[in-house]
Image (cartoon, helix red, strand yellow):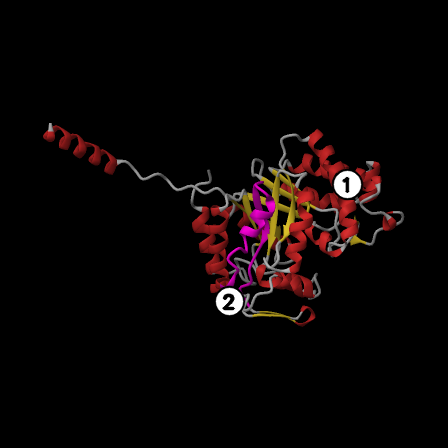
Amino acid sequence: MVLAAAAALTACSSSDADDPAPAETRATAMAFTPWPHDATLAAVSFTYDQILANGDWVAHHLDLGIPWEEALQGDPYPTAVEDELNGRVANTPLGTPVYLAVTPLNVGRDGLAANWGATGAEPLPAPWDTRGFADAEVAQAYSSYVADLVGRFQPACLNFAIEVSELALNDPAEFQAFLGFEATVVADLRAQFPDLPLMVSVGLKSPNSAAMATLRAEMPAAIAHVDWVGLSVYPYAFFDHADKGDPANLPADWFSQGVDLAGGKPVAVAETGWIAEDLVIPTFSLNVPADEDDQTRFVQALLAECERHDARFVTWFSVADFDALWNGVLAQDPLAQIWRDTGLFDGIQVARPSLAAWQARLAVPLR
């Protein structure tokens, strides 16, 4: 009996040793936006090539404004708007999952989005310049516009209010009006696209800050309407701890605070990045030392947190540093400088060490 048992144990052990170890998989899809490093066809081509080679999804982040009157009346959009939308669709291979992010908010996140017209983001014309989220025309136009974009892009997920958390901080009264607007828009979209996950995104701040305390109090009302919660997280700029260019100094709950805010709903990283060079912007009193090693360590920490919390996807905003775009079209805008040096490729499109860290995770099969 003892010999038989030993033989059986030996056979079982041998069989187990011969079986391959369970393959590792990852929960989090990986994506970039097609934000180019320069305003040239070559830069756009390079960007799409890299986001398709180094990601599972394409993240289309539309933040120039809304063609308000055309959307309300059902009229054709300006040619420049159509060209941008058609170009994005044409550059996204059929079958590639899309994360679509749109917003009714302006760049300052304190009121209605600009008019997206022939020259890009334009001042709101009358009567839109006096309208807000309490006006029925705003919800009607926005629902129509977003539904049209969903039809074009066929997204796997829709963020219909990029960083609406900032409105709660910048204009609490208008945020309350937004909640009614949101309910109307969500009802319209769910009626047309019942299987499409809807989300809004939250700009994370230092966990113990007054701003995060406000968001913990106010955002649940907006989160109640959606399926997923997007996290917008750039701690090197928008957190307030010391030596914040070094990811080793991140607060322990820098990521989990967003998971807690979601209240059990799935989270996704709607946008993120980390500088690979020193960030000095006197306009915003920013002086943050950082280098390529800091960026690589943040990529690793970020992807580990995403897996720990089963994030649905993560979007690294810029493929490459956009020095050329910043010096040209963006006219050295101080706000844009916050993100200028966050590419996994540098300003002359040479891969940084962070790209290898990103690719190592990408190589793990997505479950």
| Res 180 label | 1
Indicate yes or no whether the magenta region holds residue 83: no
Q: Relative to 288, is 115 on the left or the right?
A: right
Q: Position of residue 43 (x, y in %)?
A: 60, 55
Q: Relative to 209, is 83 on the left or the right?
A: right
Q: Residue at x 56, y 54 (%)?
A: 319
Q: Position of residue 190 (x, y in %)?
A: 69, 32
| Residue situated furthest right in the rendering | 126
The image quarter containing residue 79 is: top right
| Res 221 label | none
Q: CA distance from mark 1 to mark 2?
A: 44 Å
SS at circle 2: loop
- 10 Å crowding of disc 1: few (<14), some (14-19), many (20+): some
The image quarter containing residue 342 is: bottom right
Q: Looking at the image, how many numbered discs can be counted on the residues?
A: 2
Q: Nearer the viewer, residue 252 or 75?
A: 252
Residue 286 appears anywhere in the view: yes
* Badge 2 amino acid: Asp
Q: Position of residue 68 (x, y in %)?
A: 81, 44
Q: Is residue 152 above or below residue 305?
A: above
Magenta region, residue range: 249-277
Q: Say if mark 1 contacts mark 2, CB within 8 Å.
A: no
- Of badges 1 and 2, the one in the foreground is 1
Q: Residue at x 73, y 33 (%)?
A: 187
Q: Position of residue 162 (x, y in %)?
A: 68, 48
* Badge 1 amino acid: Gly
Indicate yes or no whether the magenta region holds residue 270: yes
Sequence-wise first label, 1 or 2: 1
SS at circle 1: helix
| Res 291 label | 2
